[in-house]
Amino acid sequence: MAHWRTVLVTTRRFQILALDGGGYKAMISAAVLARLEEDLRMSILDHFDLVAGTSTGGIIAWPWVPGRRRGR
């Protein structure tokens, strides 16, 4: 009789926040994210492993680059 060993594998989801470019759409995204951070008193980086964007969305993602401090 075979003995089966149960292996518990814990995996953590890799959370990505992708910001769309396109001029004013990115500005709306930036305003919403800034307001969320202000209201929740938490950084977006506390909830996402990667913040990226296309075109203007990439520029908007810049404040959430890990290791970068605001106000610099």
Image (tube, rainbow, N blue to C red):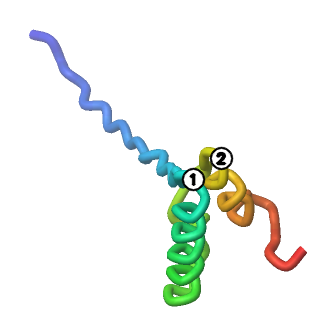
* Residue 46 higher or lower than 53, as above or below: below
Residue appearing at x 61%, y 59% in the figure: 23
Residue appearing at x 60%, y 53% in the figure: 51
> Mark 1 = which residue?
22
Mark 1–mark 2 distance (CA, rounded to whole Å): 7 Å
* Residue reaching furthest to the left: 1
Under circle 1, the secondary element is loop
Residue 16 is situated, as x and y percent measured from the top left of the image, at 50, 49
| Residue 31 placement: quadrant | bottom right
Residue 24 is situated, as x and y percent measured from the top left of the image, at 57, 65
Amino acid marked by disc 1: Gly
> Of 9 and 66, which appears nearest the observer?
66
* Residue 67 higher or lower than 50, as above or below: below
Whether label 1 touches label 2, CB < 8 Å: yes
> Of 2 and 11, which appears nearest the observer?
11
> Mark 2 = which residue?
55
> Of 38 and 5, which appears nearest the observer?
38
